[in-house]
Amino acid sequence: MAETEETEEIEQAAGPARRYRVEELAQAAGITVRTLRFYRERKLLQPPRKEGRIAWYGEEHLARLRVIAELLERGHALGGIAELIGAGESGRDVAELIGLQDAITAPWSDETPVHLDWAELQAAFGDQLTEENTAESIAQGYITVEPDGITHISRRLMEATTALVGEGVPLAAVLAASRTAQEHADAIAESFVSLIAEQLLGRLDQVERLSPAEATRLRDQVLRIRPLARAVADTQFTLAMDRRVRAEYERLGRH
């Protein structure tokens, strides 16, 4: 009983929920009455409550109009907004419709594979084209062996490998350095994934509760962060190279 009285007191203190006539709602949302009625015709806005001849709108209608305005500002067409709103109301995956899933899972690399036949490989690597080196390349996930040669997942990495071997660096040494670089790159990627997952994507465990506007905002954040992560990784690598090269030069100078 005491709990009921306390709830009533809180509701009374908060005051009655705000109600709007159509003109008042349009003014609060910063749109024209004509636009508001257009949204109603397109079923973007929930029906009002009728009392006699008067149609009353509430805070939920104003919130919906603000969502529509935000999505329009972000470039969504009215048809897409209607689909998103319908998805939210029917419990469908708003994040998928808004493009959030694609933004998260889209490939980061823009590498193109390259195929080399056995004659080309022999010309590039000679007697270094051994079973051990081939097995190491496969283990690192860079090549697949086919009857007429191999396919490397990255033309740039393959060209760098052949260039280093051409400069006199043994293929086995290149592959050893590649494995170390891959391990460190995985660690850097893990740090970025953890940062994004903890700071942004934690909300995805309640994706069904994301409004279209929230899903759009999160998608845009992910798209903005992707190039930032690449820039940070590239800068960290070049700064590390500066430090290591200077240290190695000083070490050699002392001998």
Image (cartoon, helix red, strand yellow):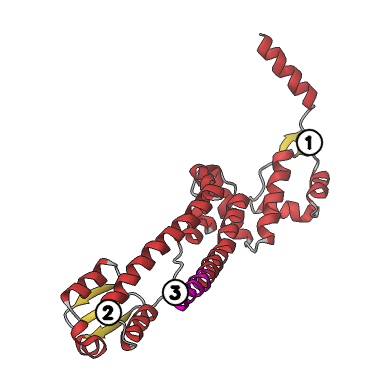
Secondary structure mostly seen in magenta is helix
Quarter occupied by the C terminus? bottom left
Q: Is residue 197 left or right of residue 212?
A: left
Label 2 sits on a secondary structure element that is helix
Label 1 is placed on what type of residue? Arg
Q: Is residue 106 left or right of residue 50?
A: left
Label 3 sits on a secondary structure element that is loop
Q: Circle 1: is it few (<14), some (14-19), or many (20+) Cα within 10 Å? A: some
The residue pinned by badge 2 equals 171
Residue at the spot x=38%, y=67% of the render? 181
Mark earlier in primary sequence (3, 2): 3
Q: Which residues are magenta?
A: 240-255
The residue lying toward the viewer, choosing from 4 and 252, is 252
Report if residue 48 is visible in the image: no
In the rendered image of this protein, does residue 184 appear above or below residue 170?
Answer: above
Quadrant in the picture for residue 7: top right
Q: Is residue 92 left or right of residue 118?
A: right
The residue lying toward the viewer, choosing from 153 and 29, is 153
In the rendered image of this protein, does residue 72 appear above or below residue 28?
Answer: below
Label 2 is placed on what type of residue? Leu
Label 1 sits on a secondary structure element that is loop
Residue at the spot x=66%, y=13% of the render? 3
Label 3 is placed on what type of residue? Asp
Residue at the extreme top of the image, as rendered: 1
Mark earlier in primary sequence (3, 1): 1
User: Residue 84: x and y, percent?
Assistant: 57, 53
The residue pinned by badge 3 equals 110
User: Residue 165: x and y, percent?
Assistant: 31, 84
The residue pinned by badge 1 equals 19
Q: Is residue 206 left or right of residue 123?
A: right
